[in-house]
Structure formats: structure tokens, C-alpha cells
Image (cartoon, rainbow, N blue to C red):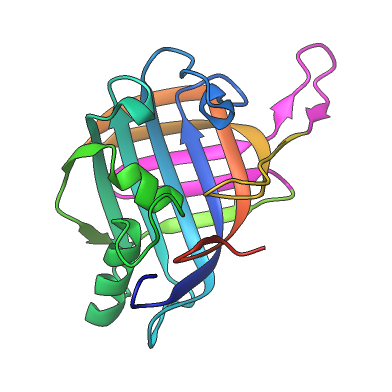
């Protein structure tokens, strides 16, 4: 067991380059054979040891040349500039998979697939997430700018609702599926439009999802 105990209860907005639903959620290969993704989270309540993390935000921009599990990935992490030195260190440890049981969280699993991690960025993170409405907005000046919204029925234009339920997941238990647009401009640059997005309530600890 890790020496330091931590937990975060948060909301997330994720937008990747896959088709709606994202095959990776089902252990299938990504839609186009590679993965590009932007993630934003806002912590409602959280701690790392004695360090409180309430109200802080973080974001990540990721790219893999193949499926995530095949490795050779690249990541850029953004930490809320409001975070103190202790909070910055705590968040970076969580996001790099430290103080976590192997395979327990998305952060720890992803960390094993990365061969290049850029220096952390400390910046203003504009993030709005409404999980039930399936809407999100993530903007980090100079890094990424994107938004998410519900899927629409192509014939009637009515809002369509679909969810992904992962009882043994390492990111969420239940996610609302939508669509998103993101433009990442550095240090990892790409653009996706009308592709998979999901919105979820997150409750993680050093041992995985808190049920």
C-alpha cells in the first residue's frame, strides 16, 4: 500500500479524436489507430496526505501514435496557478501515478504508457463542466481551447443521451457521452472536431475508484 493516502472527488470533461463512444472504453483499438485527447478536471474535495486540494483544477493534453496500451505516448500537464507549492507537488505526484497502487487509477496506468512528459505548466485554467447536461468548456491560454455538448439525432435534431458504465473502471464508474471540439496549440498541437467527449463525476483514491 502507498505510504501517502489521497482522494479526489471531481468533475471531468474529456475530448478525444475517436468516434462517439470511443472504442478505448471497450478495450478496442482507437477509431483512427492513434489517440489524441484533452482532459480537464475540477476537484470539488480532495487531499493528498495533509494537503487539501479543494477547488483546484488541472488539465492534460495527450498523444499516442497507436493505441494507448502500446505506449510511446506524450503528455503535457497543466496545474492550476492558484495552487500552492505543496498543492502543486501533491497534484503532480497523483497525476504521475505516484502514491498509487499499480493499475488503480487512470493516472497511474497512463503514466506507464508515456515516453515523453513535458515540464508541468502552471496557468489559469478556465473549466466548466455540467455532467448531466453533457456540456463542458476548457480553455488554457496558449495550451488548449475546447468545448463539449450533447450528441444530436441526425434526423430530428433532438438531444441524444448515451452512457458508459464501467463497474471495474479506473477512471469513472459512469460517464455521460457527448461530442467535442478542441484545439491544442502547445506544447502538443492538434485539432479535433465533432468527436468523442465524455463527462463524469470522479471519485478516486490511491486504491482506485471509491464506490
Assign the N terminus to one quadrant of the image: bottom left
Residue 12: % across, % down: 54, 52
Residue 193: % across, % down: 48, 23
Q: Residue furthest front?
A: 1
Q: Residue furthest bottom?
A: 50
Look at 46% across and 30% down and name the residue there.
16
Residue 20: % across, % down: 61, 23
Instruction: Give the image quarter of residue 190.
Output: top left
Does residue 34 appear in the picture of this structure? yes
Look at 27% across and 21% down and name the residue there.
65
Does residue 80 appear in the picture of this structure? no
> In the image, which residues are magenta?
133-161
Look at 80% across and 21% down and name the residue there.
157
Q: Disc count in the image? A: 0
Assign the C terminus to one quadrant of the image: bottom right
Residue nearest the observer in this picture, 112 or 51:
112
Q: Is residue 130 magenta?
A: no
Instruction: Give the image quarter of residue 19.
Output: top right
Residue 36: % across, % down: 37, 28
Q: Is residue 37 left or right of residue 62?
A: right
Look at 35% across and 43% down and name the residue there.
110
Question: From what the image shows, is residue 173 above or below residue 45?
Answer: above
Q: Is residue 32 left or right of residue 121?
A: right
Residue nearest the observer in this picture, 129 or 108:
108
Amino acid at each position: 500500500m502507498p505510504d501517502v493516502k489521497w482522494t479526489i472527488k471531481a468533475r471531468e470533461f474529456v475530448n478525444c479524436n475517436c468516434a462517439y463512444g470511443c472504442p478505448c472504453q471497450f478495450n478496442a483499438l482507437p477509431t483512427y489507430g492513434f489517440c489524441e485527447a484533452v482532459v480537464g478536471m475540477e476537484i470539488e474535495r480532495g487531499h493528498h496526505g495533509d494537503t487539501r486540494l479543494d477547488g483546484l483544477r488541472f488539465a492534460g493534453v495527450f498523444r499516442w501514435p497507436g493505441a494507448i496500451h502500446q505506449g510511446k505516448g506524450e503528455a503535457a500537464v497543466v496545474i492550476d496557478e492558484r495552487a500552492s507549492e505543496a498543492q502543486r507537488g501533491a497534484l503532480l505526484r497523483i497525476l504521475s501515478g505516484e502514491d498509487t497502487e499499480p493499475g488503480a487509477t487512470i493516472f497511474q496506468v497512463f503514466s506507464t504508457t508515456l515516453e515523453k512528459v513535458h515540464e508541468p505548466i502552471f496557468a489559469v485554467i478556465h473549466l466548466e463542466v455540467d455532467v448531466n447536461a453533457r456540456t463542458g468548456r476548457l480553455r488554457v491560454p496558449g495550451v488548449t481551447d475546447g468545448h463539449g455538448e450533447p450528441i444530436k439525432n441526425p434526423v430530428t435534431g433532438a438531444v441524444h443521451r448515451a452512457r458508459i458504465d464501467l463497474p471495474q473502471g479506473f477512471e469513472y464508474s459512469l460517464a455521460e457521452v457527448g461530442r467535442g471540439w478542441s484545439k491544442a496549440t502547445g506544447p502538443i498541437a492538434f485539432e479535433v472536431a465533432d468527436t468523442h467527449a465524455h463527462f463524469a463525476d470522479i471519485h478516486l483514491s490511491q486504491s482506485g475508484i471509491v464506490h
